Image (cartoon, rainbow, N blue to C red):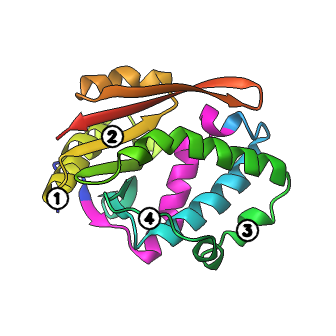
Amino acid sequence: MNSRKLTITPMRRGDIKACAELSVQAFAEYEYFTNYFADREERLAFMRAMIRSEYRTTRKRAHFLVGRNDGVPVAVADLFPPDWKKPSDLQYLLHGWGHVLRLPKQDIVKQWLEMDTRAGHYCHTLLGGTTWYLSSLTVNPSHQGKGYGREMLTDVVAHYVREHGGNRLCFFTNSEYNLAFYRHLGFEVADYQELDCRGTRMGSWSFVKEL
């Protein structure tokens, strides 16, 4: 499947490391992570271990769409289908979660995981029928501002969901900066909550759009 600017392919096993690193670099300064890991090196170590394990564990369960520019991954969309079931703890352990468990400050790791569950709860309740969940959409920081995020969301992801029988898409964001962008693309806020992140309040907006 080809889009106007990017070549779109499923994520292959050999893509996991590059795609995970793309996500690490894109989200490294987001409050979602900085509220828990103020030290950058600790934050990057956690993100690399967690995201790589997540991608390895869910690659065959979720639908990963990789946008390539001259063959190089520059954007990744991670979609959960309506019949999504979270993998077991054993599946995570078999796919590298032990690296997360060996990190220091396990109390903070646990708090982050609990926050992540709360932030995504509303969207997970919508899954089913013809509703898909966009777990993450990543664009390489060096390629941002070129319209790739808009293309991935409105052309690639929306087309893919409709092609697979879906008619509604949901996702959440914790970046107030992005709200106007999503609203401009026709998404509406369906739920809002404030999360207590180690004493810091962080907004969480869940968006929904009928496709």
Disc 1: which residue: 2
Q: Which of marks 2 and 3 is in front?
A: 3
Res. 149 mark: 2
The answer to whether residue 130 is above or below residue 72 is above
Is 58 a magenta residue? no
**Which mark, by number, is residue 85?**
4
- What is the residue that sits farthest to the bottom in this orientation? 94
For discs 2 and 4, the disc positioned in front in the rendered view: 4
Graded by Cα atoms within 10 Å as few (under 14), some (14 to 19) or many (20 or more), the crowding at tag 3 reads some
* Amino acid on which disc 3 is placed: His
Q: Is mark 3 on a helix, strand or loop?
A: helix
Separation of disc 1 and disc 4 at Cα? 29 Å
Q: Are marks 2 and 1 in contact (CB under 8 Å)?
A: no
Rounded to the nearest whole Å, what is the CA distance between mark 4 and mark 3?
Answer: 23 Å
Q: What's the amino acid at mark 4?
A: Lys
Q: Which is more N-terminal, label 1 or label 2?
A: 1
Say above or below: 3 vs 151: below
